[in-house]
Image (cartoon, helix red, strand yellow):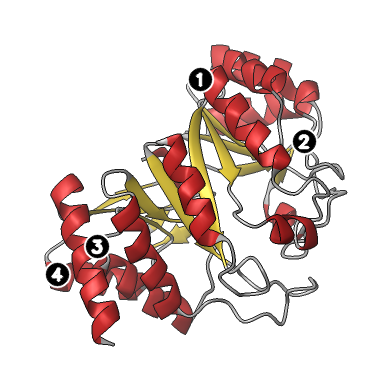
Amino acid sequence: MPELEQALERARELSHAAHGPNLDIFLPGMFTAYGRTGRYPAVSITGKSCSLGCDHCRGRLLRTMRPARDADQLYALGLKLAAQGQEGMLLSGGSDPQGHLPWDKVLPAIERLSADTELILTAHVGRIDRGTAKALKQAGVRQALVDVVGSEGTAQRVLHLADGLAGQSETLAACQEAGLELAPHIILGLDHGHLHGEEHALELVAELEPKRVVFVVLMPLKGTPLAQATPPSPQEVAGFLAQARERLPRIRHHLGCARPRGRHRRELDALAVRAGINALAIPSDGALDQAREMGVKVSFRDTCCSLA
């Protein structure tokens, strides 16, 4: 595929010109790989509960998170994690039918943990308004992770958001107005494995001018309506990464932890390194082998990749 090869080479040149031939490897959550264990657990403020029921998740991802359903539980968990030497927490949870998380009930705990510990606190915020964004910032949340979707239809059919992208626009504006650092995430293949709207999502991210953008890939999860979906191929994803670098040449590009495992991951990781990806979460040997072959300097960090 000469066209893809040329695109990857051009993307790599742009990336290395802006950031050098470097690759940061991240171990988020408490994953263990290559003799290291992550020190940045994900915490659900709703436990396993989610009323939105997006087709790609149906609450399955919440089962892997530490539960903390109220302020007292969150504060106690935070103190315990700090005592264990954890770097921080990614706060997340299930949504109501409009995509909102119950941040109000845990704001006091976030504020106390910010004052009483050195934990870095980031949040996968869902849909928030200006008041909530300001409250999270004032409480001590350092960064807002926001899924950026480019298709009204995908937002309605897959994410079950009746207002489509309207709430997303409000959320992004609210975070910027509050001074919350944004870590936009683009999910490739969210529409049943098809690339549909991702280019528009990329344009929306470009308008935000963030320090970084995180790319993740649909993971068909057992027990969800998308369990039998076929994710975009490694070549499709790599082509989009190269396109993204052309559009956003100077910001950091990260490949997040949500992506298919096995052969797909090995192939994609190698292609992503060839495209000059700046950060990679939970890598395969394919990424490290490719980096070694290309003379790319690899550094390890034990936190969520959005923090680089």
**Nearer to us: label 3 or label 2:** 3
Residue shown at 70%/55% (left/top)?
152
Residue 303 visible: no
Secondary structure state at the residue bearing disc 3: helix
Q: Nearer the viewer, mark 2 or mark 1?
A: 1
Residue 73: percent from left, percent from top: 76, 29
Q: Are marks 2 and 4 in contact (CB under 8 Å)?
A: no
Against 304, residue 198 (above or below) is: below
Q: CA distance from mark 4 to mark 1?
A: 38 Å
- Tag 4 residue: 294
Instruction: Give the camera-side residue of 274 and 48.
Output: 274
Q: Position of residue 41 (x, y in %)?
A: 57, 44
Q: Quadrant of residue 177?
A: top right
* Side of 74 where 193 appears, left or right: left
Q: How much space separates mark 3 and mark 4, taking CA atoms?
A: 14 Å
Structural distance between the alpha carbons of marks 2 and 4: 43 Å
Name which residue type carries label 1. Answer: Gly
The N terminus - image quarter? bottom left
Horizontal and vertical percent for residue 115?
Answer: 56, 11
Number of numbered callouts drawn: 4
Residue at which label 2 appears = 101
Task: Determine the CA span between mark 2 and mark 1.
Answer: 20 Å
Q: Nearer the viewer, mark 3 or mark 4?
A: 3
Nearer-N-terminus badge (2/4): 2
Report the Cα–Cα distance between label 3 and label 2. 37 Å
User: Looking at the rendered structure, which numbered label has been put on residue 11?
Assistant: 3
